[in-house]
Image (spheres, grey):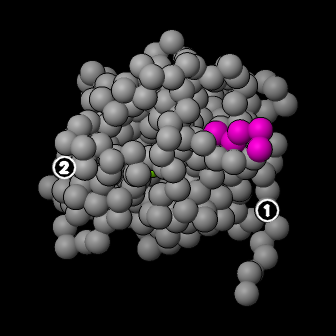
C-alpha cells in the first residue's frame, strides 16, 4: 500500500492510498502524519486504517498515471547517510584524489567505522516532489543525482514508510575539500522525494529493494544504472539510531540512506536533463534539471 498526495481539480492537495493494482482512494486525513497519529490513537495500524477506508469507498475515476502528484510528505527536515555502499565510497575516493588514490581516505574510514556518516540535507522549502525542477548549482561543473531509498520516520525513530529520494550532489565541490560538504549537498531544490510512501507493513524485505536510475538528454537516454538495498553495508535501524542520538527529530523526518548508483566519472548533469529514479513497489520519481541564476534572497 502506497500513500500519495495529489492536487485535485479545485487545486486542493488530497491524501490518497494507492493499491497494488494502482487503484486510488482518497483518504480523509490532512496529511501522512495525521493518518499515522490517528492509527495510533485507535490502537490500530496505518495499513488497517487505510484498508477500512478502502472497504467503505469507491476508487477514484482518474487513473493514478493522470494525477498531478505532489511531494508525499512535507518533511520539516531531510537528513542523509553517506558512504553506505562500496560504490559511493569508490566514487568519493575518485573525486577527492583525481583518481590517483594511494592512501586510506576519510571515505575508506567511514565505510568501515562503527559510526555512519549522517548529514543534514534539506528542509521542506528546499525539497521538491514528482515532476518538479531540481536545480543545478551555478558554481559547480560536476553534478549528479544520487538515487536513494528514503525512510519516513516518526519522532521516536520508527520507520513508518519507504520513499524514493534524490540527493543532488556536486562532485567537484566535495572532492575539493570534505569540509565543503554542506555546499556540495544543500542548495535550492537540491533534494527530491516521492512519488509515494510505501507503508512499512507492506514491504516484504527492505533489503531487497531495487533502485534504477535513468538520465535523459534531448529524449535520449544518457545513463542507466541499477542497484539493490541488499548491497548496503549498514542496516536501516542503525542509521536511524545515530540520527536520533541526542537529537530532536520531528515527526515525518525523511532519512536518505545513501547511494549505490554513480554515473560515469565524465558525466555531469545539464540544464534540460530529465532524471528518473525508480524503486519498483514504491514508484518512479521524475525530476527536471534546471540551471538557476545565483541570486541571494534577502
Ligand atoms: O560523503 C559524502 C556523501 C555521500 C553520499 O551522499 C552518499 O553516499 O549517498
Ligand atoms: Mg547521497
Magenta span of residues: 6-10
Element at label 2: helix
Between residues 227 and 284, which one lies in front from this camera angle? 284
Residue farthest to the top, as pictured: 21
Crowd around label 1: few <14 · some 14–19 · many ≥20 (10 Å): some
Q: Would the CB of label 1 be found within 8 Å of ligand 2?
A: no
Outermost residue to the left: 114
Residue drawn 46% across and 16% down? 20
**Type of secondary structure dominating the magenta stretch:** loop
Q: Is residue 262 magenta?
A: no
Q: Which mark is residue 195?
A: none
- At x 78%, y 51%, the residue is 290
Classify mark 2: residues with Cα within 10 Å, few (<14), some (14-19) or many (20+): few
Residue at image coords 49%, 70%: 182
Q: Is residue 222 left or right of residue 164?
A: right
**Which residue is painted at 80% across and 48% down in the image?**
271
Decide if ligand 1 comes within 8 Å of the CB at mark 2. Answer: no
Residue 65 visible in the shown view:
yes
Query: Quadrant location of the C terminus?
Result: bottom right
Report the front residue among 22 and 289.
Answer: 22
- Measure the C-alpha gap from mark 2 to mark 1: 37 Å
User: x, y (%) of residue 279?
Assistant: 48, 27
Q: Which residue is situated farthest in the front direction here?
A: 56
Rendered location of residue 133, percent (x, y): 73, 49
Vertical placement of residue 100 versus 245, above or below:
above
The secondary structure type at the circle numbered 1 is loop
Name the residue beneath numbered marker 1.
Answer: 292
> In which quarter of the view is residue 242 placed?
bottom left
Quickly name the residue at label 2: 238
Q: Is residue 94 left or right of residue 287?
A: left
Q: Quadrant of residue 104?
A: bottom left
Task: Please state if 112 lies on the left or on the right of 209 as rendered.
Answer: left
Amino acid at each position: 500500500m502506497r500513500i500519495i498526495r495529489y492536487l485535485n481539480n479545485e487545486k486542493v492537495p488530497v491524501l490518497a492510498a494507492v493499491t497494488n493494482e494502482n487503484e486510488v482512494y482518497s483518504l480523509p486525513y490532512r496529511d501522512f502524519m495525521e493518518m499515522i497519529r490517528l492509527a495510533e490513537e485507535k490502537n490500530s495500524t496505518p495499513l488497517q486504517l487505510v484498508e477500512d477506508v478502502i472497504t467503505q469507498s469507491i476508487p477514484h475515476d482518474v487513473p493514478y498515471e493522470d494525477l498531478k502528484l505532489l511531494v508525499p510528505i512535507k518533511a520539516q527536515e531531510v537528513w542523509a547517510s553517506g558512504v553506505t555502499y562500496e560504490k559511493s565510497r569508490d566514487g568519493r575516493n575518485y573525486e577527492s584524489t583525481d583518481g590517483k588514490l594511494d592512501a586510506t581516505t576519510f571515505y575508506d574510514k567511514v565505510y568501515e567505522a562503527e559510526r555512519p556518516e549522517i548529514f543534514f540535507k534539506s528542509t521542506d522549502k528546499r525539497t521538491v516532489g514528482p515532476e518538479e525542477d531540481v536545480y543545478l548549482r551555478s558554481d559547480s561543473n560536476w553534478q549528479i543525482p544520487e538515487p536513494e531509498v528514503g525512510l519516513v520516520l516518526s519522532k521516536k525513530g520508527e520507520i513508518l514508510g519507504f520513499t524514493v529520494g534524490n540527493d543532488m550532489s556536486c562532485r567537484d565541490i566535495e572532492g575539493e575539500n570534505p569540509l565543503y560538504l554542506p555546499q556540495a549537498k544543500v542548495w535550492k531544490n537540491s533534494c527530491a522525494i516521492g512519488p509515494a510512501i510505501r507503508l512499512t507493513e507492506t514491504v516484504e524485505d527492505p533489503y531487497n529493494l531495487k533502485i534504477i536510475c535513468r538520465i535523459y538528454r534531448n529524449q535520449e537516454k544518457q545513463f542507466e544504472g541499477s542497484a539493490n538495498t541488499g548491497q548496503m553495508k549498514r542496516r536501516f535501524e542503525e542509521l536511524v539510531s545515530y540520527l536520533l542520538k541526542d537529537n530532536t527529530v520531528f515527526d515525518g523526518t525523511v532519512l536518505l540512506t545513501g547511494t549505490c548508483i554513480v554515473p560515469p566519472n565524465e558525466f555531469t548533469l545539464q540544464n534540460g536533463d530529465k532524471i528518473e529514479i525508480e524503486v519498483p513497489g514504491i514508484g518512479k520519481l521524475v525530476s527536471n534539471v534546471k540551471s538557476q541564476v545565483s541570486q541571494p534572497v534577502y
